[in-house]
Image: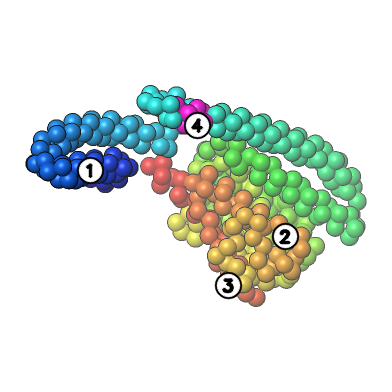
Amino acid sequence: MKQLFRYLYERRWLLGSYIFFCAVFAGAFALFGLPVKAVIYPAAVCGTVGGVALICGFAEDSKKHRELSGMIGRQSELIDSLPEPKTAVEADYQEIIRSVQSELRELGENSSKSYRDMIDYYTVWAHQIKTPIASMQLTLQNEDSPTARKLSGDLSRIEQYVGMVLAFLRLDSSANDYVFRETELDQVIRQAVKKFASEFIDRKISLDFEPTGEKTVTDEKWLLFVIEQILSNSLKYTRAGSVRIYMRKPKILCIEDTGIGIAPEDVPRVFEKGYTGYNGRTDKKATGLGLYLCRRICRNLGAQITLASELGRGTLVSIDLGQYRLRAE
């Protein structure tokens, strides 16, 4: 009904013209003393013919409307499926649409090419930068001094940031980079802890690791990245105290620290891209990407990551590793 009203409204000038001419003829007949009723017959004939024309036009308009509505949201390549133009104006509009669609396709191809070139460049850069990092780490292994340990810790941070770059680049282009298999969770945790062992020792922060004895279906490499990132944050914002790693049933891995904590207003937004909050404004080196990457990767792993914190008392990060198995079943 709404479409009918729209159709009649768009042709209001035709209906108005019909009524106007009927009134003109009736007035002319009255002025010349002719019977006004003589106007009714030709008016009825014209009205009938016009009504049939309107009905046919409405049917054609409804068909075209259904065809166009069916194309909404479909691929732009279906632009050639537009209804056959009935007028020169419709043909002009379709030509404009095709021209705009062609320009958009060209812009999209150019943009995709530029994006791929950028991804390729930074991927190569990230892999190349690992070589001098590994070389410097090997050199520092032969020295045992406070300076060497500090430099080794800084290199580990640099290596971690390079890993973040690679993870960020692969987020939207690594659909085939995930290999799910049953994995020993304790083995993954120990790899992450080993990477930060020297930092735990140098800063005199105790580690309380309760072996979980759990196996989970996940991608070991990406889960390791997530755990490393969480441990890195715990060490970064824990001045003194401890970091505790334990399993809470069912299959919820917890990493808890006694650090400076997170302001209540910042907690709901810590997983947002680029958000650093109060702690980030204090620590100018914060990027706001670590937890964002963790959440994106956990989603790809079929896991759920949550965070609870109290200012001045520490932070608890929980990873529900039972999600993937539940979804698979």
Q: Residues within 10 Å of mark 3 (few under 14, many from 20)?
A: few
Q: Nearer the viewer, mark 4 or mark 1?
A: 1
The Cα atoms of the two marked residues, 4 and 1, are separated by: 43 Å
Q: Position of residue 213 (x, y in %)?
A: 53, 51
Magenta span of residues:
91-98
Furthest residue in direction bottom, as rendered: 312
Q: Which label sits in the foreground, 2 or 4? A: 4
The residue that label 3 is drawn on is: 264
Query: Closest to the observer: 7 or 253?
Result: 7
Q: Which residue is mark 1?
A: 24
Q: Which mark is residue 97?
A: 4
Whether the residues at callouts 4 and 3 have beta carbons within 8 Å, the answer is no
Disc 2 from disc 3: Cα separation: 18 Å
- Which residue type carries mark 2? Ala
Residue 205 position, x and y percent, is 72, 66
- Mark 4 or mark 3: name the one nearer the start of the chain: 4
Q: Mark 4 against mark 3, which lies toward the viewer?
A: 4
Q: Residue furthest front?
A: 32
Which of the two discs, 2 and 1, sits closer to the camera? 1
Mark 2 — residue? 286
Where residue 253 appears, as percent x and y from the top left, is 54, 56
Figure check: 72 above or below 231: above
Foreground tag (3 vs 1): 1
Residue 75: image tag: none
Q: Disc 4 on helix, strand or loop? A: helix
Q: Amino acid at mark 4?
A: Ile
Please tell me which of labels 2 and 4 falls first in the chain: 4
49 versus 199 height, above or below: above
Where the C terminus falls, by quadrant? top left
Which quadrant of the figure contains the N terminus?
A: top left
- How many angstroms separate mark 2 from mark 1 (CA)? 81 Å
Q: Residue at x 14, y 34 (%)?
A: 42
